[in-house]
Amino acid sequence: MIQIKDNIYWVGKKDWEIRKFHGEEFSTHRGSTYNSYLIKDKKTALVDTVWTPFHREFIDNLEKNIDLKSIDLIVINHTEQDHCGSLPYLMEKIPDTPIYCSKNGAMLIKRHFHKEWNVNIVKTGDSIDLGDNKLVFVEMTMLHWPDSMATYVAGANVLLSNDAFGQHYASPYMFNDEVDQCELYQEAQKYYANILTPFSKLVKAKIKEISALSLPIEMIAPSHGIIWRDNPLQIVEKYDQWASDYHEGKVIVIYDSMWGATKKMALAIARGVERKGLGVKALSMGKYDKSDLMTEIFKSRGVIVGCSTVNNGIQGDAAAVLELIKCLKFKNKIGAAFGSYGWSGESVKIIEARLKEAGIEIALEGIRAQYTPSPDEIKSCEAFGEAFAEKI
Ligand code: FEO
């Protein structure tokens, strides 16, 4: 139990070993944490729990520090298993404790656990007096689940923001001023790019709504990673920037290649982009981590995608990456397609269709080469890269 401010304590779990999150979807190279908070006031409130596999450790730790029966209420900001997974085990010990959550949270608690607990629905502006502090609830619908909610601790002036402003980042330290800033921002941006990008419009609206409340915010304590205590609003400003159709003006060339011909095209296209003075990365969709790839796309203005034609279609990794791009609903990006083929040569048209479906404007008609590109075709690829760069 680590005191973070006044009578607020961190009672979470640092998960040093996790390398994939959301099943196998999201890479977590630096581990993660599941942050649960205890507010010990005249009343004691527990906000969120930890992921299911750590329920025993979580409850043992709580029991070492407090009598579980002294918990007057539990707030569930979000019912995804990484925050709510220990709830049923805790409720076995303190079955009558009231739970507070959003309306959708109540429905999802029922869907997840099928139990009859004392669940109470709260909405934005509702509050619970704990003594010196007051919990004020702010619904965060679709940031990133229908049930998501934040809890503001008035008195201590701490925003328990749940997933928002989090990072999959296990550190020996607790606070933003104690950690490597590059690591911190890399993880915060990857988290935003992979989880919050589809909801950017809502992020902007929510920031506006919360700013209008003029709440004094001395600390932002998310449910993953480190806690923002030094200039906590810096991450809110970053979110506002990231939610504004963000890019850094560079180009990414991503490719899948069966025998190296499409790779040759990719590298030639990248050379062309580079000649025009733009930053460019050429990355293999098969080899590069897909969550990191989405972060690179998030940072790019131009996305050029290429792969070989195989069985009248596209390669598997390219199909997976194009699906991820579509689901993340990136905005304000332009794209193009390329690829080598043997006889039928459908890949370029398929990639173009998938990019369009993902809302990425095709800036340039795609380029193909049969089998291995000739020296002239390599020159054409370089010219293609230059022409694409001109569109930016
Ligand atoms: Fe960290 Fe949406 O759960």
Image (cartoon, rainbow, N blue to C red):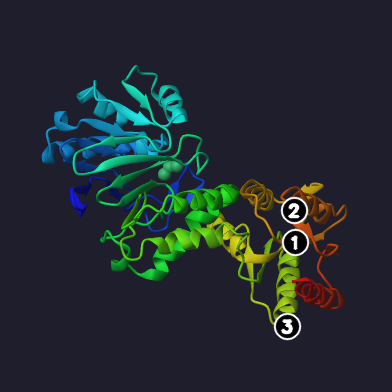
* Ligand 1 occupies quarter: top left
When the figure is inspected, residue 85 is found, relative to residue 344, above or below; the finding is above
x then y, percent, for residue 207: 49, 52
x then y, percent, for residue 74: 28, 32
Residue type at mark 1?
Gly
Judge: label 1 CB < 8 Å from ligand 1. Answer: no
From the image, tell me which residue sits under label 2.
355
Would you identify the image quadrant in which residue 335 lies? Answer: bottom right
Who's the residue at 42% across and 33% down the image?
A: 123
Q: Crowdedness of circle 2 by 10 Å Cα count: few (<14), some, many (20+)? A: many
In the shown orientation, is residue 73 left or right of residue 116? Answer: left
For the C terminus, the image quarter is: bottom right
From the image, tell me which residue sits under label 3.
275
Of residues 157 and 189, which is closer to you in this image?
157
When the figure is inspected, residue 97 is found, relative to residue 77, above or below; the finding is above
Disc with the residue nearer the chain's start (1 vs 3): 3
When the figure is inspected, residue 107 is found, relative to residue 52, above or below; the finding is above
Of residues 126 and 219, which is closer to you in this image?
126
Residue 370 visible, this angle:
no
Of residues 33 and 156, which is closer to you in this image?
156
In the shown orientation, is residue 100 left or right of residue 309? Answer: left
Q: CA distance from mark 2 to mark 1?
A: 7 Å
Q: Crowdedness of circle 1 by 10 Å Cα count: few (<14), some, many (20+)? A: many
Furthest-top residue in this view:
116
x then y, percent, for residue 284: 63, 63
**Mark 2 element type:** helix
From the image, tell me which residue sits under label 1.
335
Q: CA distance from mark 1 to mark 3?
A: 18 Å
Residue type at mark 3?
Arg
**Mark 1 element type:** strand
Residue type at mark 2?
Leu
Who's the residue at 25% across and 49% down the image?
A: 155
